[in-house]
Amino acid sequence: MIEAIKIIKYFDGKAVLNSVSFSVGKGEICGYIGPNGAGKTTTIKILTGIIKPSSGTAYIDGINIVENPNAVKKIIGYVPESGAVFETLTPMEFLSFVGRVYQMDETTIIKRITELMEIFEIYEHRNEPMLSFSKGMKQKIVIISALMHDPKVLFLDEPLNGLDANAIQVFKEIIKKLAENNRTIFYSSHLLDVIEKICDKLIIINHGEIIASGTVEEILKIANVTDLNDAFIKLTGSEKLGEKIHNFINKVK
């Protein structure tokens, strides 16, 4: 369903992604993890057709993202790291607009808005301008807008920002149900406990290169540890940072 082939991306002459290749099958939930600046968001922006790779390509449901990005955008949903809404609009106005962009009929638009807003317990605010909404409420609308058209592939970049515990649980259940219905989920996050619980496979990226991939169990075996946080620290070299912090604290004492 997702196939990345030797993707390279340069910014200001520096390789942010260096020959990144991987595949994610239909109905899989793939966790994409790495330190800040590793290349996660750049990868997602390429896979969603927002930016072009310097070289290499990717296929989403068999469609070449470089050659036909508009066709890809019709079948994907995307929750960006810093999602935004038109705050002067109400959720009904904004989400109706999104539905029309995807050429959904009006009956289906209203049905989907109602269902999703009720699931996220925000339906009572459907006709209120979003200027007064909290960060979490706006994030719910961004998530709903990505789910409106029942996408075949869903890209998530830190989707839980601002959500409360109940909304996070609802979101996790939705993701699981989507995967059961053969939707593919590509999930980038720093929340390893969530990633570990819901993802079928993991891909770890560091300094623009894939350094490990597989199930949680396979990643733990590669790192020779029993905890995903320990595996992440070991494989990305973050344990050296831990030593520096430890030394600093001892000096402060």
Image: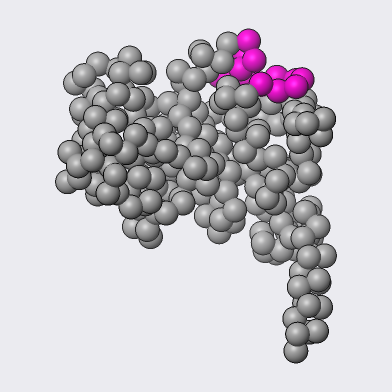
Tell me what residue is drawn at x 21 percent, y 19 percent.
Answer: 106
Quadrant in which the N terminus is drawn: top right
Instruction: Give whichever of 250, 167 is nearer the camera.
Output: 250
- Image location of residue 115, percent across then percent down: 24, 37
Q: Which residues are magenta?
A: 52-67
Q: Is residue 20 visible in the rendered structure shown here?
A: no
Q: How is the image coloured?
A: one colour
Tell me what residue is drawn at x 59 percent, y 40 percent.
Answer: 30
Instruction: Give whichever of 237, 170 is nearer the camera.
Output: 237
**Outermost residue, top side:** 67
- Magenta includes 60? yes
19 horizontally vs 93: left or right? right
Tell me what residue is drawn at x 51 percent, y 14 percent.
Answer: 70
Q: Is residue 33 visible in the rendered structure shown here?
A: yes
Please tell me whether residue 66 is drawn above or below residue 85 in the rendered image.
Answer: above
Q: What is the count of numbered marks?
A: 0
Quadrant in which the C terminus is drawn: bottom right
- Image location of residue 202, percent across then percent down: 65, 45
2 horizontally vs 71: left or right? right
Please tell me whether residue 21 is drawn above or below residue 64 in the rendered image.
Answer: below
Tell me what residue is drawn at x 44 percent, y 43 percent.
Answer: 176
**Outermost residue, bottom side:** 253
- Magenta includes 184? no
Please tell me whether residue 164 is drawn above or below residue 215 in the rendered image.
Answer: below
- Image location of residue 137, percent across then percent down: 32, 48
- Image location of residue 82, percent across then percent down: 49, 42
